[in-house]
Every structure is written in structure tokens, then in C-alpha cells.
Amino acid sequence: MAKAAVAVARSYEREGRRGAAADYDVGLMLAFQKGSELSFQELVERNHGRVIGLIYRFISDSSDAEDLAQEVFLRIYRARKTYKPTAKFSTWMFRITANVSLNALRSRANRRDDVSIDQMSDFGDGPRAMPDPDSSLPDVRLHQRELQEKVQEAIRALPEKQQVAVILNKYEGMSYADIARTIGCTTMAVKSLLARARDNLKDRLLLYIQTGRGRQPVS
Amino acid sequence: MPAPCQWIRSVLAAYLDGELKSSTARAVRRHLERCESCRAHARLLRESWRLLDEVPPRPAHAGFTERMMARIVEEKDLSALASRLRPHELRRQAVASVLGLAAGLVFGFAVYSWTGLPQEAGGPVEREVSRNVSFLEDADLLDEMAVIEAMERLMSPDDAADGA
């Protein structure tokens, strides 16, 4: 698949190129730029798992994750004429992914504000918010789910840049330098962002840490 | 909090991430060996960071690439449609602009004719009179002069005989 991309990527290897130019995905993108639709298809095939995974870290909703991932690849598709291989392909792709995810979170927050105003005169939501006493879920799974929700809440409560830095560092294993390139700031700024983010997370998750296993809150 | 502890805490996250220069990392390690409070702080940071692993990764969506490529086909169809429509749209806008301009000119001319030239209606003599405002101002005087001249002719029999 995508012979042109393979040829481009191999020629880079022969020439001993490093960084962005040695990136196989950059080769695919350049081949796509020259008209190879198959290269774009291979880009999607190779990267959609990471993109969907990353979006899910931001929005915690798998049903929206696919739509947003399509939006990410659509932006990549539309940007083929202006694309320049100045950085690793993943850096560029993750920047688009973070922007799309944060936009979705912002519009979701706006919608939630509207809904909560509408619900002020609506009593229907009360009983549904009560825990189900007949739930057959074992305690362990309940605690596990509660913990997951608390962790996701703690991440979402961070300021946007801290949130992006945490997700890229923790779940994508990106270095401070790569995060800096992705969000467009200095490595020192990322160091400071992550220091504050980790302090914030520690404060928000303190109850779940002190049990030693992080499984149950201290009562 | 002592100053060294403040500095250690500002770089602790980078230390745990392995993002410090080796000399700085050594200094942090030495401080942690001596300082119980900073060691406890480091443990909390490490444990809270580990809790983030509790959120499971999202498995890849089967058939995503096929759905994505189908959407790309739709996208291409839409842009092709847009490019096909574009010349037609331009022609339509050009015709609308010309018609609009013509209608504006006709309307402007009609308004101007109605409001700007009422005194100039009539034949060439009236138009000349209306332009010569000073003549109009002296009209009464000229009228009186004509009457005087007529009376003078009546009172002069020679002139009257000559005229006969």
C-alpha cells in the first residue's frame, strides 16, 4: 500500500535524514500531497487508534470520539496543500487532535449550561440521580468505576493547557520538548505546566491516594 | 517551608519524569534522602500520577478507516459540486449586479427629474425667464415703464399722426 510513500520514506532513510524528514508518516503525508490517496488511507489506518484514544482521554465519551477523530483526519485531508514537514507528523496530528477535543469540550460545557438552566424548573432528574440499591455490580467494580470517574474529573478540572500537557505526557509518553512543540510553547513552560498540574492532581485525588492502593476513598 | 524545599518541589515533577539534567537530578536525589517532608510530597505526586492509569485506554474502532474514507468521498463530492457551481454562481451574481445598477440609475434619474427640475418645465422662453432671476425682480418696474411709454404716445398727437 502507498508505494509512493514507501519510496519517499526509504529515500529519506538512504539520505540519512533525521527528525521530521525520517518520519514514515511524514513520507505518507508528502506522498498524499503529490496525489496518492492510498497514502492518506494508510495514514488513517496507522494513526486512528492513537487519535481516538487521545480524544477519549479528553472527552471520556466513546460515542463522540469517532466523530471527532473523523474531524481530525478531515482537517489533515484539507490541509494537504499547505502541509510542510517542519516537525514530526504526530506532533502536528496531536495538536489538531487536542484542538478538536478542547473545542468539543467547550461546546459541550456551553450546552450543559443551557441544559442546567432548563432543568431548574424540572424535577424529573432527581430520582435518576439516586444510586440503585438493587445494583448487581460488585463493590470492587463500583469502586473501580468511581475511581475512574474521579480521575477523569480531576483531569478535566485542570486548566486547558495543563490538561493537554498531562494527557500527552501521561498517555502518549511524550517528552517535555515534544509537548512544547505540540502546544506551541517552551520546554520550560511545559515543565512549569506539568509541575502545577501534578500538584493539582495530587490535591484532587488525595483521598484516593492515602489508602495506599488507590482503590477506596478514606471515610 | 525552607527555601531548598521550595526549589525541590518546583522541579520534583520534572525529576519524577526524568526530565532534569543529571547534575540537577543528583541534587534532588540527595535532598530527598535527607528531607522526610519532600520525600512524602514526592510519594504523593508519584501515587496520584499512578492513579491516572486506572482509566483504561479506548480500544480502536473497527472499520474506522473505511468509514473515514467514505467520508472523504463525500467531502470530494461536495467540493466538486461547489467548484461546478462556482462559475454559474459568478454569472448569476454578475447579471444581478448589472440589473441592480440599471434599476438604480433609472430610479435615480426619475427622482432627480421629479425633485430637481420643476421650475424648468415649459418652453424655452419660460426656461430662460426662470434662469434670469434679476429680470424677474425688475418685472414690475418694466411693466410701469411700458404703461408710461403708452401714455406718452397717447399724449403726443404728432407721434399718433405719424403712426397713422
Image (cartoon, rainbow, N blue to C red):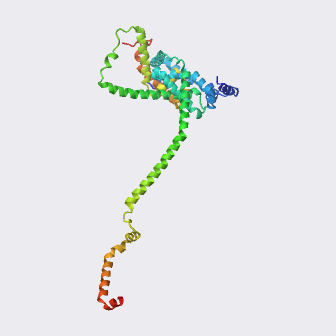
Q: Position of residue A55 (x, y in %)?
A: 49, 23
Residue situated furthest front in the rendering: B164
Looking at the image, which residue is at 42% across and 29% down? A107
Decide if residue A22 is on the left or right side of residue A70. right
Note whether residue B122 is visible: yes
Q: Position of residue B118 (x, y in %)?
A: 37, 63
Residue situated furthest right in the rendering: A14
Looking at the image, which residue is at 57% across and 22% down? A47
Decide if residue A29 is on the left or right side of residue B8. right
- Quarter of the figure with residue A128: top left
- Compared to B136, does A101 lie above or below? above
- Quarter of the figure with residue B2: top left
Looking at the image, which residue is at 59% across and 24% down? A41
Q: Nearer the viewer, residue A102 or B23?
A: A102
Which image quadrant: the N terminus of chain B? top left
Note whether residue A198 is visible: no
Q: Nearer the viewer, residue B54 or B34?
A: B54
Q: Position of residue B121 (x, y in %)?
A: 38, 65
